Structure formats: C-alpha cells, structure tokens
Image: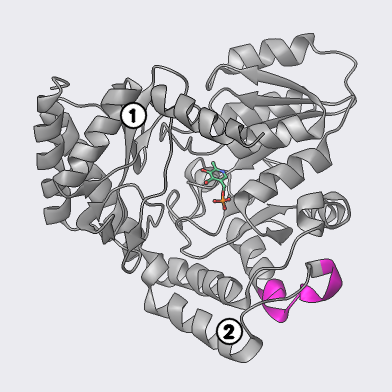
Amino acid sequence: MTDFFGREIERLKRKDSYRWLRGMEGATGPRMQVDGREVIVLCSSNYLGLANHPRLKTAAIEATDRLGVCSAASRLIAGNNELYRMLEERLAAFKGRGAALVYSTGYMANLGVISALVKEGDVVYTDALSHASIIDGCRLSRAAVKIFPHNDLDALKDLLKSDKGFRRKLIVVDGVYSMEGDLAPLPDLTKLAKSYDALLMLDDAHGTGVLGEDGGGTLEHFGLKGSDAVDIEIGTLGKALGSFGAYVVGSRDLREYLINRSRSFIFTCALAPSALAAAIAALEVLQQEPGHRQQLWANVRHFREGLYRLGLSAEPSVTHILPVMTYERQRTMELCERLLELGIFCQGIRPPTVPPGTCRLRFTVTAEHTRADLDQALGAIEKSFREVALL
Ligand SMILES: Cc1ncc(COP(=O)(O)O)c(C=O)c1O
C-alpha cells in the first residue's frame, strides 16, 4: 500500500513539481545560510526586519521567563493567558475596529472564519488569485463557491446580480495579492458589497505593517482605516510583525460569534507566551520606529528601478512583493539554483501556488537589505537571466 508514496514522489519529480525543504541556518535576516551556503535572502516575509529586533526578542524572553514556554491548553480551556487580552486590545486599536481575536496562524484564521460565516445554502465569492487558505476555507464551508477573475469587479457584479436564493453572501479578497504584489480595488469593492448586501472579508497578511502612513495596511492605504468598509479583516503576525500567530478584527459581536463557532479557534492549543509578547512589542515598534517602513519603501524603489533598468518588469506589483515571470517550471527552478550559486536566495514559485504557465521568481525586499545587497542581487539576476536567454 505504501508504494503509493514513492510512485507519487517520482511522478512529481518527472513533472518538475517536486518540493523539498531547504536547510536554513543563522538568525532570520537579509543574509543567512541556505543548504550550507551564505546568501542574500530575497524571499522572506520579514518585511520590516522585526524578526530579530531587540525589543521583540527581549519581550519574548521575558514572557518565557515569567509565564513559561507553552500555554498548555486551548484558549477556552485554560490557555487564555494575560497577554492575549493586551494583544487583542492593541490590535483592535491599531486597526481602529471594535475588537480583535487572535488565532494560531493566518491559515487557520481563514479556514475557521470563512467556515463559521457561511455554510450550505450560502454563497462565497473569491478572487481567482486568492491565497490557498482562503480557497481551503471556502471549500470547507460547504457554501457554494464562485471564483471571479483577478480583480474583475464587473465579473463579480454579474455573479452577485444573477445569484438568487442564497441565504448569506460573503466576498473574500486579499489586500495585497501574495504572488502578484498588486492590491484589491477596495474602495469599489466595498460599494459593491454594500449594494448587494454581501459581507466583505479582507485578508491583509501582506499589507499590514507595510502599507499606509502608520502601517495600518491596505485599508489605511485607501483612506478606509477604522471604517466599517470591510466586515471582517484577518492578518498574520508572522510576516511584517515579526512574530507568530494571526488575528481577526471587526465588531465585538463578530469576536464573540467566532469564539463560539470557529472550529480552528476552538480546537487548538493557545499560542506560546513568547509569540504573544513579541507581537505586542512589534505593534509598539511599528508606532515608535517608522524608519523601518520608510527604509523598506526606499529599498523597494531601488530594487524595482534596478529590475526595470535590466529590462525586467515586476508588473502588476505596486508593493514590496516583486514577481519576475519565468513561465516554465524547469527554467524557474534552474534559475533558482543558479541564483543560489551566485549568492542569492529567491525560491521559485510553481503551480499549484500559481496558475500553470505563470511560474515566477517572487522577490521580496526587506527594510534590512543594504543597497549593496540589492545591487549584488541585481547583478546575479542579470547574469542568470542572460544565461537562459530571458534577457
Ligand atoms: C494572503 C495570505 N493569507 C494567509 C496566509 C497564512 O498566514 P500564516 O502564515 O500566519 O498561516 C498567508 C501566508 O502564508 C498569506 O500569504
């Protein structure tokens, strides 16, 4: 029976779809060891460089000393330690909403929120490029799932118009699309959701901490922070905020509803105190040290202009996620390996993460990269892309 594993692995290798884990060593940062080689990392989500910030580390160590390593129960049993309340109050204030609820991961938040909001007899609409956790949440819900082409609000409107007889309608979108780096057209989307009486849910995993004057995310970028433009917003603590975990923000009623109805919230162990304390410190750093965000955007500009000078485009990105199309699986992975030889780590992205024929190298710039790092990366990109005639 277990022959199946080996056969499937061989099949994946033949299709250039095989995935394996790389060995990362060293402190999370712009330079690390990958499979024993020192490289510049251009594919992490440590956008502001907070993962190794002294204030986050001190907060995590103090929380561990004081409260222990593990919360040792689900939140509804005995795991709701004192740091949760503080973090949720600060997250709600940071997003300008009535309440926040912390989840264990963004993946679990999407699964548990979507499946709690819609069920059989309801309908959920989502973008063709939505994150896998949104798609999985939609599937789990047993609601009818309708996918509209990326950012095509006319197509969404047609669906909303023609769909009759569903009890509840939910629209779920990303704020910043994780593989494209472009934004959801939120101002128009909020109007559309309201006029068709649909709930609107935003996943701002990549916008939070990065977009908006105060790092409030995609809603702040569009001047919608603190409004009820979206009914539900989720985000992760494991990207720009440099910690681990995730959250949902919205109304107080939403929070209570999820505590009672969201299975991925209810049936899992509470986060470690260190993760909660680090996230609290991250929110303080975000407010008190805007220089990280400014540096990130300066780096994004420098890298984007460098790509452009080489004749490469990161379209449709308008953010720190800069995809360069390489199209075919084999070439993408060859380029990834070649870049590693040249001292640059950018993981190749293939289906099912992106649609077939749209493989890419998805570069993510962080505040901690130096100009020299970025210039070295651009040099390596030029060399490797020339070798495979993509330049
Ligand atoms: C858009 C989006 N949503 C959700 C997640 C999941 O978040 P987490 O890593 O906290 O599970 C990710 C990232 O991995 C993401 O890119």
Indicate left or right for 306 with 195 as reference: left
Q: What residue type is labelled 2?
A: Ala
Q: Which residue is drawn at 72% across and 32% down?
A: 138
Residue 227 in sight in this render: no
Q: In this view, does 348 lie above or below 225?
A: above
Nearer to us: label 1 or label 2: 1
Residues shaded magenta: 76-86
Q: Is residue 234 above or below residue 117?
A: below
The scheme the figure's colours follow is: one colour
Q: Which amino acid does label 1 sit on?
A: Arg
Residue 375 in sight in this render: yes
Q: What residue did someone put label 2 on? A: 63
The picture places residue 13, in percent across and down from the top left corner, at 41, 28
Q: In which quarter of the image is residue 89?
A: bottom right
Dot 2 falls on a residue whose secondary structure is helix
Magenta stretch, main secondary structure, is helix
Indicate left or right for 384 with 217 as reference: left
Q: In this view, does 284 lie above or below 225?
A: below
